[in-house]
Amino acid sequence: MTVFSDILRAHGITAKSFIAYGEPSLTGAGFSALQDGAELYAQMGFLIYPYQDMSDGYSSAINDIYAAFSSLGGGVIGGVTGWGYTTGMQFDCAAKYPDEQEYYLIAGALVKATSYGIPGIVQESPLYLAEWVKQYAAMDAGLGLDKVLGISGWPASDHGVNYAGAQGANGGHNMKTYTRYVNSPLTDSTGLGFYSRDVSSDGAHVGDGTPCLLWGLREQSDTAFTGQTTVTVTGAGSSATYSGGIIPTVAMANDVTTYHRASSFVNYYATAGDATIELTLLQMVQAKGLGAMARTAIPLDIVANLPAYYGSPVVDIGTDPSNAYAVMQSRGGGIAGVPYFNWANGSDNSSNPGQSEQVGIATSETVLNFFLNGVPYLSNLDFFDVDTEIEELEAQAAATSWPHFSSLWKQIPVGGWFGNEQNVLHVLTIDHYSSVPQTWSALGLICRQWATDSYASLSGWDLSQFQVLLGLPAYGQDLTYAQDMAQLRDAVNAGTNLILWSYPSEATDLTGQGTTAIPIPYGHPITQPYAEDDLNTGMPNGYGTINQYGAGKVIVLPENRYGDGFGANGQGSSDSLASGLAWLTMNAILWAGGQPTPAMWLPKYVQRTSWANPNMGPNDQGQYSGVGIHLIGPKNGGKTLLLSNSQTVAQQVAFDLDAAFFGFPWNYVLRDANTGQVISGTSSPVSINVTIPALDWMVFVQQSVPITTSVQLSARAH
């Protein structure tokens, strides 16, 4: 399933890495040779370089960068124009195409758009797209697009990064643009044309009913407008006619600014123009046959308006782990969300807690937090965006734990979580806190994950594609609750199975509480392989119930408290795999999805494991344990078990994996890249019983040949 890993492997990149965000220099700080700078970056785990300095078009400099990084097991991504809608300053386009000149509305007047004294054209112009196609054709001739990983839509530092005009100007004004905007064939997710979002069928503004000054442009051609003079408007409304130049009247520009700019002109039409550039260039690279990805900062709801782009391997540059995880869940991993982290660029802005603009360099604490509470819970990703400058790289390496963790990260072969890789069991989580990776990412061990906020509408979700649903729409919070519950009931009635952790009064027909629900008996696959006495101690109120609802089943596994298990109770934090209920939930998911149970289990059933956070939160609520458990890789191939511990004391972690379910060979050998510890055996289960050092990782990489063991962990009897 992991298209991103497939793309990387096709280009010879086999290890997890970091993207050198922000286009750092590869020379300086004593590194006069480009190769030396590239080697320093590779040593720190940076194998992917987004070549973005294409302000003046294709340059053979990218050939040298490709040669350096490919010799180190890495690669390059081609550059693209800025994100969102920026003025087209590149390639001397304003001189080539004066009728595409962009105008800014400033203090009630329209003036030529410039940036650093360079005039620019409207970025959604078809002619601007044609110029970018020329540059990629030149790159193909000079380097070969088959050598490029894809496209990277983030501008070089000398160009604006704001929507509708460089440096945040009120831009995009040009009669050709207005005409293309009004007549654009693109629609939003509701099926409305961009301009149609803002006007009624008689040409009045939806907001206040006043006539729209662009209404007469319907079915016009943009070829009608030439010359850098102000357009002449005759008549009004649907009878208006236009003649003359490309400069709108100030009244028209104010109309766009007041009624259309935020709602559709910038946020939909103009930005979709930038997305069209990215899609076109991506398709040029994809045509070479090795596969390619698009690294974009365009909002995904805009990308979704171009189905061909939204269906491509898109890497969305996120802001934090929760945002990135939610992106992954929105498409089941079909789109990757990558959080931005500033490690070593003091002159840039920062995403690091407690730091302000222009103080971007990360402290040792923020680096440790990134690796302990971020990276493991997004280890389905093959790379992260990290901001650096070569002048600060060595000092930051000496001052932080980056070299230690990056050396472990690059020991992991590319690939996603086992459950996502398998793409067999499709599960949708419905929970307000579903984007918290520390709670929910553990499900990636056994299934492919999707998720949606329980406060949001289920409209647009095809529930029939899932074997299992976890949770319900939130009563009193979901504005379309009645419709969403009806949709969910229909899905369960048709055969989708539902798992809950309580008996909500508004869903008694689903749960069958007190009527048709049947108690889960000891010995049921959900209870395996635990001893009855241990289950009775851990679940004193019973193991739960199963209710047949049409062709589907509703399974309720009663929680003991807030935050028990995966904590889908509106409280946020949870024990996750530090509680027995989460392990039973995985059994229930597998059973409901027609898979054998158990796939993984605790040596003894307990309400809370030895590594659970002893500090219970409000309402006696389970909390994030700081211990992460993730299995990366395909069934038929090498796997990596990543164990992380953000607690300040070492934690003993013990559990078993079914060798057949996870595809381990009969003579498995796993070696920790950190401590050298080895787990090996010749039968199922694969028994894990290790002590994770404080504030550290263990990275057990499956070995292809027997090795001498320093520690032997034998399988336990059950």
Image (cartoon, helix red, strand yellow):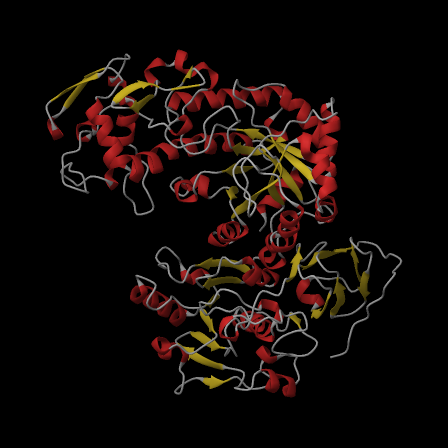
**In the image, is 509 to the left or to the right of 439?**
left
Using the rendered view, name the quadrant where residue 58 is placed: top right
Q: Camera-side residue: 350 or 180?
A: 350
Residue at position x 34%, y 63% in the image: 478
Residue 650 appears in view: yes
Residue 127: image quadrant is top left
Q: Is residue 171 above or below residue 519?
A: above
Please state the total of marks drawn on the protein image. Answer: 0
In-front residue for pair 499/497: 499
Which part of the image, by quadrant, shows the C terminus? bottom right
Q: Residue at x 63, y 58 (%)?
A: 418
- Where is residue 60? Give x, y as percent: 63, 19
**Residue 1 placement (x, y as % from top left):** 58, 51
Q: Is residue 410 above or below residue 270?
A: below
Is 307 left or right of 446, judged from the image as shown? Answer: left
Q: Quadrant of residue 444?
A: bottom right
Task: Name the residue nearer the viewer: 699 or 2.
Answer: 699
Q: Residue at x 65, y 23 (%)?
A: 63
Asked whether residue 71 appears in the rendered view, the answer is no
The residue shown at (13%, 30%) is: 238
Horizontal and vertical percent position of residue 152: 54, 33
Q: Give left or right: position of 701 versus 323.
A: right
Whole-percent x and y of residue 325? 52, 53
